[in-house]
Amino acid sequence: MANIWNTEKRKDLRVDAKIKVCFRSMGEFAEEYTKNISKGGIFLKTDKLLDPNAHIELMLSFPDNKKEHKILGRVTRLIVMSDPNDAEKQVYGVGIHFLKPEAQTIKAIEDLYNKFKEKGD
């Protein structure tokens, strides 16, 4: 069953989805997968420490969509937690808000919503 949800604080619906996202952190290339996505942004886990409020260039690769989506985002949330596989290691939950997403990126997210809705029905 698909998990599409919204909370009172959130403007946009979110969907739990694994979307490949690439970015640079402190000069290092990183490739991670989202935990959830909305028209407004993404949430992911990473072992890369990102600066709070930093602007970051992202490259999103949606399933069933051959085009990569380049988008600028701002780190709005940073949660420090222990790695479930290694208690000595820290990982970070990162919320990134999209800054002026292009229409084709919004369409790809809407297509993803629709795909998950159909699976949930």
Image (spheres, grey):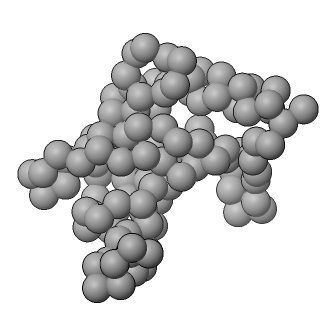
Residue 43 percent across, percent down from the top left: 50, 55
Q: Residue furthest front?
A: 85
Q: Quadrant of the C terminus?
A: top right
Q: Nearer the viewer, residue 89 or 25?
A: 89
Determine the residue positioned at 44% across, 75% down.
Answer: 84
Q: Is residue 93 above or below residue 17?
A: below
Q: Nearer the viewer, residue 36 or 56?
A: 36
In the rendered structure, the answer to whether residue 48 lies left or right of residue 86 reads left
Q: Residue furthest left?
A: 27
Residue 34 percent across, percent down from the top left: 48, 48
Q: Quadrant of the N terminus?
A: top right
Residue 36 percent across, percent down from the top left: 58, 49
In the rendered structure, the answer to whether residue 13 lies left or right of residue 27 reads right
| Badge count | 0
Q: Is residue 4 above or below residue 91?
A: above
Q: Residue furthest top?
A: 66
Q: Residue furthest right?
A: 121
Determine the residue positioned at 80% across, 31% down.
Answer: 119
- For residue 31, which quarter of the picture? top left
Q: Is residue 49 visible?
A: yes
Determine the residue positioned at 40% across, 15% down.
Answer: 67
Determine the residue positioned at 19% across, 54% down.
Answer: 25
Residue 78 percent across, percent down from the top left: 41, 70
